Every structure is written in structure tokens, then in C-alpha cells.
Image: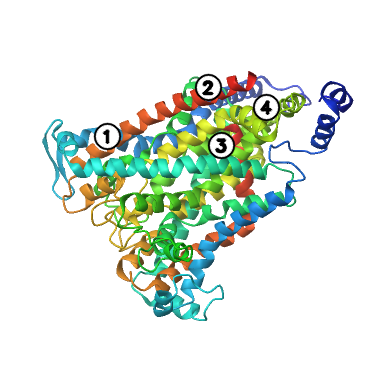
Amino acid sequence: MSMNSAPPIPQKAEDEAARQLARRTRRNAWDRKYSPYLYISPFFIIFALVGLFPLVYTAFVSVHDWNLIGGKGDFVGLENYGQILSQPLFWKGLRNTFSIFLLSSVPQVIIGLFLAAMLDANLRSKTFWRMGVLLPYVVMPVAVGMIFSKIFADQSGMANAILANFGIDPIRWHADVLASHIAIATMVDYRWTGYTTLIILAGMQAIPNDLYEAAVVDGAGRWRTFRSITIPALKPTIIFVVITSTIGGLQVFDEPRMFDQLGQGGSDRQWMTVTMYLYELGWGAQKSFGRASAVAWILFLIILVIGAINFKVTQRISGTESKGGKS
Amino acid sequence: MTSTPMIEQTAGKGAARYARRRANRKSMGVGSNRRGGWVTYTLLTIILLISFYPIYYTFLLASSDAQTIAQNPIPSLIPDGKFLDNVSRVLNSDIKFWQALSNSVIVAVITSVSVVLFATLAGFSFAKLQFRGRRALLVFVIATMAVPTQLGVVPLFILMSELGWTGKLVAVIVPGMVTAFGVFWMTQYFEETLPFELIEAARVDGCSMIRTFWHVALPAAKPAAAMLALFTFVASWTNFFWPFIVLGSTNPTLPVSLQLLQASYFKDYSLIMAGVILATVPLILLFIFAGKQLVSGIMAGAVKG
């Protein structure tokens, strides 16, 4: 590099310099060509080993007789699936999962929308209020489960004591199917509503001002503006929120697991979710990895289908809203 | 921006006043009517109390005793003085609290560092380097964010058994070492903030790729990397399903040992809640110092996502 100022160079040294330069250029070219792959490879290698491979291999395990202790047995085809689908317990788990999922995600998105609209106002100490709604996010779901299972205790819980003050009869939060689902959905929402609110808030702040100004010019009121401008403009954000909450919500485990000390989903399995059922098949009394895998694979397909439906429906709803806004 | 005189002409005085008021403000939310301000503050205060009360409730129970708790479903707002007694009972119980705490710290720290390092490397590559298949691979990364990898637990468990890792922390650390979200996050950040000129300048100066990464990209990535580390830390600290399966009660992390506490002392709420407080306080402290970063992290991620 500092060759320019050098005195006349003997032939031999010049050769050496040329060789060096060529080597450096080669190394440089190699560096440019392969380094990008090198840098992304840790992610792909580790993800392939501990993320993708297990998910795909689940399908393989699910068509075998496979025991936690005994290991791999015979190929049984779709027998495990048939077994699972004929179990009332599986269907109960599926019902509970969907019920808890709907009871948690629908209010979560609606409350999130209104909370975000409040936080979007010109507030003093914005960060303080935003942190306030996010606080529950750092409480681990297991802890949330333990706290709320006490609040919702059938006999000596705070929820029933408060209801009693209003003259309402105690609710059997654990014994009743729907009540237990509401209690668990409350736990999920306690932890996640603030998070969802902030995502929606970010979406709201990205809405261009002139849209609102146009609405003001048209004489639209606050509610009308919210419904006809804000909601349609939030379409991508809402789709994002709904899809992530579907993926998480259909795998819910921690909160229902902690809703009582036994962790089996209640005496009549009234709040046992599919993931809890999966755990019980694999690591409970049956120790059947084959059946646990079949459940995992069924749930995986359900999540895919629901995700796609969500996408379509959310798109349609926001689509009509925006059309309504123009009329 | 539409000028207010124009609005006055076209839509009347009221609209103009409204528009002026709006124009004076930075954010243009729907709930942002100044007159309604106190309603907003009142509602937000209630929300804040709802956020905070369950944690305080836990502390109240943790400061009490079983008999008082049984007699008063709604605890008095002033704590009893038995908190330290209950804490020492948790520490002396057989849930291996200290081991669980140190396990949780080890796992959360290692996974955070690893996720940040690998995500920054990959993000740098995706955002700023040219190579064949870049777009397709990036789409793959984004798609994997939606894959419920938790459903692969059975083969993952089989794999860990084969390796002899069940019951060992490494079984929890390795699956947490990379996240698709992290790669996506850092890619976005580099795309927006790191100019190509800086990289080219370093290359012209004779820096190798890895030196360019180390001396140019990594320092530039600090704010985003810190946020990613925070989120990974929280996710790792609160993670239950997989550690519960693969570690079990012999070598637990905090959530696993809390589960044990509830299973073995289920009638003794003051003890259980003291355990909950002990396991939650570290993240509450983190939240006090870094909550602001968490808030802006979620909001930044949402706009891009």
C-alpha cells in the first residue's frame, strides 16, 4: 500500500509484491463471497437442529409406537391419530383451548384498541403510563397462574368476596367449565394486554395526520373517526396481533397448568388444554411419545389453518370498515 | 398540512378551532380531546392500579399467615410484618431456591448474549452484504417466526436424552441460543441505520469482513442489541414449558421451582406468595431501570413488523 514512494524496486521484490497483492485480492474475494454465509450460518444451523428438525421429526415419531422409556417401537401408521381422535379427552382439550383462546384474545384486542387510543392522547409523562400498562409483562406466567388461582379460589378467593359485596352469589371459578375458562383468560390477558396495547399504539402513531384532518373537515365525530379512520388504518397491526395471539393462545400451558396444585386441568378436565394433554400423554402415566407427537402434529395443523382463516377474516372485516368510511 | 383559515372557510369556525387544537399537538390520536383529559387520566390510573394490584396483593399475602389469609379473602391494604419469616421459610424449603435462582440467571444471561451475537451477525449479513439467495433466506427467517416450535418438544426431548443432557442446563440453553425474531429485528435495524458508505469505507481501508463487523457494525448496533438482550432475558426468565419438561425438579429454573412450591405446599398461601415475590422481584427491578427501553422496543418492533 505504501509502494508509491518506494525507490526503484529490484525485479525479484516486485514479483514478490505482485504475488502478495494477488494473494490478498484472492483472500479478499473469498472473504466477500463466503463471509455472508458464514455469518448467517449459526442461526440456520442451530435453528435447523433444535427448531425445524424436531418439528418435522414429530411427524415421524407420530406414526410409531414410541415410549418415553422403551424408545422406538413398530411402525403403526396412523393408528396414533385414530386413537387420539377417538378420545373424548382430546376433544375436551380442544374445546377448552378454543374457549380460553377466544375468551382471552377477543377482549385483549378490544381493550388494547381503547387503551391505545387513550395512550395516544397528548398526555403528561407518556412513558410513565406506557410503562404502567406493560408492568404485568415481566411477571412470569407461572406466577400469574399462582396469584390468580388464589384470587379466583372457589371458597376463600378475593373475586367471590368482591362479588359478595355486591350481593352476587359466589361463582365456582374452578368447578364450572365456563367460569374456569374466564379465570384463565383473565390471567392470559393480565400479562399480555399491555403488550398488545403498545403494539396497537405504535400502529396508531404511524397513521398520517392528514387522514384525521380530512375527517375533521368532513365533520366526523370522535367515535366516527375512530371507527372509520383509525380501525381500517390499523389493519396490518391488527392482523399481526391476531396472528401472534393465535399462535401463542392455542398452545397455552403455563396458566391452566398452575390453576390448581395438581396441574391436570381440573377434576373433570374442565380447563385442560391441548398442550396439557400432549404433556400428559408423553410424560404422564402413558409415556407414549407416539401419541404425544400425534397431538402435537394435529395442533400444528390446526394453528396453520386458524392462522390462515384469521388472516382472511381480519382482512375482510377491516376491508368493509374502510369501505363504510367512504360512504 | 391543511391551513386553518382554509378549514374555517370550508368547514366553519368550530372545525377550524378543532383543527388548530389538533395541529398544536404532536400526536393525533382519537382519544386526544383536551377537554376529556381528566377522564383519560382517571381511566389510565384505574388501569395502572389493575396492573399493579396483583403484585401488591401477592406481597400482602406473603407478609401474612395462613390463618389470616383464610379469614380475610380481601387482604388489608397494610402489610403484616411476616414477610421476612415467610421468605426464610421459602429459602429453607426443599424447592432449591438458590440453585433455581442461579440456574435462571445462568440460562438467561447466556441465551441473551448468544441471541444478540448471532442475530447481530446474521442481521449485518442480511442487511448489508450481497450474496446469492439473500432474499429467499430472509423470507425463510421471517416465516419461521410464525412456526410454533414448542410443538417439537417430543423429538427435542429424545435428542436431549440421546445427548445425555436431560436435567442439565445446556438442554435449556442450546434451544434458546438463536431466535428468528432476533435476526429479523437486527436486519431491520441495520437496514435503517447503518449506511453502506461506512462499510465500504472500512473495506477500502483494508478491513476484513469480520473486522468491519466488529469495529463498524457492532458498535452501531448497540441500542437495538440492548433491547434484544432485554426481551430475550425476560423471555428466558419466564419460560416454563420446556425447562419443566427437560430439567424437572432436580435441577430447576425459577418457574419450575415455583411450580414445585405450589404442588407441595398448596394450602400455605403465605409461603407460596413469598416464593412468587422472590421469583418476580428481579424482573421488577429490571423493569424499573429498563422498562422505558422495553416500551420503545415493543413499539419500534411493531411499526416494522
Residue at mark 4 shares a chain with residue at mark 2: yes
- Choose the circle earlier in sequence order: 4 or 3: 3
Callout 4 amino acid = Phe
Place residue A53 in its image quadrant.
Answer: top left
Which-is-in-front pick, marks 2 and 1?
A: 1
Query: What residue do we see at 45% from left, 24% from top?
Result: A312
Label 3 with label 2: CB-CB less than 8 Å = no
Label 4 with label 2: CB-CB less than 8 Å = no
Q: Would residue A45 be seen by someone viewing this image from the given angle?
A: yes
Q: Nearer the viewer, residue B213 or B288?
A: B288
Q: Nearer the viewer, residue A30 or B219?
A: B219
Local crowd size for mark 2, using a 10 Å CA cut-off: few (<14), some (14–19), many (≥20): some
- Give the secondary structure at mark 3: helix
**Count of numbered marks:** 4
Mark 4 and mark 3: Cα distance apart in space: 18 Å
- Compared to residue A167, the image places residue A319 above or below, namely above
Residue at mark 3 shares a chain with residue at mark 2: yes
The residue identified by callout 1 is: A298
Is B142 on the left or on the right of B27, as rendered?
A: left
The residue identified by callout 2 is: B131
- Give the secondary structure at mark 1: helix
- Choose the circle earlier in sequence order: 3 or 2: 2
